[in-house]
Amino acid sequence: MVIDLSRLSTEEMNPRTTNLDMMTPRELVGVMNAEDAHVQEAVGEELDHIARAVEWAIESLRAGGRIIYFGAGTSGRLGVLDAVECPPTFGVEPERVVGLIAGGEKAFVRAVEGAEDSTELCARELDELGLESRDLAIGIAASGRTPYVVGGLRHARELGCKTVAIACNRGSAIAREAQLAIELDCGPEVLTGSTRLKAGTAQKMVLNMISTGAMVGVGKAYQNLMVDVQQTNDKLHVRAQNIVIEATGCSRDEAVCALEKSDGSAKVAIVMLLAGVSAEQARERLEASGGKVRGAVAGA
């Protein structure tokens, strides 16, 4: 079967780069930089839809659900990347934000040919994850037609999940399967069909917005500080100290002392110092405020 890709903007030849093979390195990086300017425009046109996805992600997390990304190739890798960065950045359990890629974990570093062509595979993998209606299912496909993603969205919708499609073509097949469509029209790629370029950049921007917005919404930030950062190395121990110092105006010695009393929790240490309470009282206040520092400091 021959698949017609001729109507996809991501597969069109870019008239501004037809002499790409004759460009100097400076000309090549210049035209790539100019083309990347279209990415921000494309994302900007979809901000209302992206904001709705953030709202749904917050609702899912508050209900004890998960954010689940799934895609193939570059799209799948970007979903996995965004998911695995959430635990160290926001201190959430790894299972709260999950990334599935067609072909499994090995496909992250080496392409698994044909894995994306099954409409049943993603559904099976979602069932293996124990997909529930309180989860948010986000399918990612630059082309907007990947069978793996189509099948995953269809299955998630049938189970009662809220579903979001992220594509880089208008009127996409995955958009028709989802309750909410984010369609990013970045125009044809510098290198024809290479959607790891503008399409990939646009997708990463959207995923960053969804995960960051969701985590901020459930109290994983105070001001613009990562107050639930996990201290897994020396750099992050110092970062936690700096976060406490920035949030409270205390000295480094005071920050170190508060972090020791809070068992390394920057969030608890901040509430302790700002509210003048013990670590136990700070944890109680955070529990009452839904994990939000401002409410805990105010005595929620």
Image (tube, helix red, strand yellow):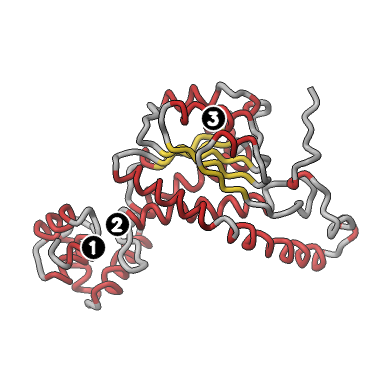
Residue of label 1: 293
Within 10 angstroms of label 3, few (less than 14), some, or many (20 or more) residues?
Answer: some
Q: CA distance from mark 2 to mark 1?
A: 7 Å
Residue 51 is situated, as x and y percent measured from the top left of the image, at 46, 55
Residue 104's disc is: 3
The image quarter containing residue 242 is bottom left
Residue 128's disc is: none
SS for tag 3?
loop
Residue 256 is situated, as x and y percent measured from the top left of the image, at 22, 67
Q: Answer with mark 3 or mark 1, whichever residue precedes in sequence.
A: 3
Q: State if disc 3 and disc 2 touch (CB < 8 Å).
A: no
**Residue at left offset 48%, top offset 56%:** 209
SS for tag 1?
helix
Q: Answer with mark 2 or mark 3, whichever residue precedes in sequence.
A: 3
55 above or below 298?
A: above
265 above or below 57?
A: below
**Residue at left offset 63%, top offset 51%:** 184
Residue 94 is situated, as x and y percent measured from the top left of the image, at 37, 41
Q: Amino acid at mark 2?
A: Gly
Q: CA distance from mark 2 to mark 3?
A: 32 Å
**Residue at left offset 49%, top offset 26%:** 155
Asked if residue 51 lies left or right of residue 111, the reply is left
Q: Total number of numbered labels?
A: 3
Q: Amino acid at mark 3?
A: Gly
Quarter placement of the C terminus: bottom left
SS for tag 2?
loop
Q: Answer with mark 2 or mark 1, whichever residue precedes in sequence.
A: 2
Q: Amino acid at mark 1?
A: Val
Residue of label 2: 219
Q: State if disc 1 and disc 2 touch (CB < 8 Å).
A: yes
